[in-house]
Amino acid sequence: MFFQMSISTMPRSAGRIMDQGRARIIAWGAALCFAVLASIAAASEAVLLQLDRTVQAVVMQARSGWLNEAMRWLTFLGTRYVIGALVIGMVWWSYRTGRHRLLITVVVVAFAVNPLFEFVFKELVGRVRPDLARLVPGRGPSFPSGHVLASVGFYGLLPLVAWEVTRRRAAAVAAVGASVALIVGIMASRVYLDVHWTTDVVAGLALGLVLVVATYRAYLERARQGAPPETDAVLI
């Protein structure tokens, strides 16, 4: 993940975690991964099922009562109801304080556009969900995982939001940890609950990374246009 710091305020000790070149590599690599998985899922799903069924069999053996409940809660955090409520909270806060309107606008646009990509690719690929021992309802096509796509698209922006709101590197680093933990947990929950194949959640992650990198770039470009030359933004 990446977040924005201005040269004038960035701590001298801050390491360069992610620059624009690495962001492009991540975006293109994720796009290639998604394209390969989508092509195989649409043309010859049996190839993916060899891996998916192996992983699913292992996951089924790991099930337990307390873990079932934990995974239900994790998957709930990836619903558009929860993410939508958080976005509304951000909008309300920005409106009341008059702060970070560009940032929140970008978050809102990303949240609104995200489901369109999910719908288009689910309809194009048309993969059927697993139904071995489903623990929660699953509706519609399986590829890619909408929960994972939505989670990456929103929780992946938390480091940017944390930095812009607090201007504290510790807050941004903590947000990176929280973001990764949430996304990984939600990915695991979708497979564990038997509503997605493993390759569905990997595809959701890949497509989400493409979209979140694009969102970061859009925000940084717009912010840079309004920034004085001495505070040009850099990605770290």
Image: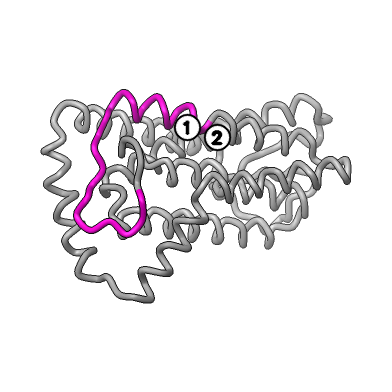
Say what amino acid the circle numbered 2 marks: Gln
- Number of callouts: 2
Magenta range is: 114-137
Q: Residue at x 23, y 63 (%)?
A: 59
From what the image shows, is residue 131 above or below residue 189?
A: above
Q: Is residue 44 left or right of residue 210?
A: left
Mark 2: secondary structure: helix
Q: Quadrant of residue 193?
A: bottom left
Say what amino acid the circle numbered 1 marks: Arg
Mark 2: give few (<14), some (14-19) or many (20+) Cα within 10 Å: some
Which of the numbered marks, if any, corresponds to residue 20?
2
Which of the numbered marks, if any, corresponds to residue 65?
none
Q: Residue at x 57, y 47 (%)?
A: 81
For label 1, the residue is 24
Q: Residue at x 67, y 33 (%)?
A: 106
Give coordinates of residue 88: x percent, y percent: 70, 43
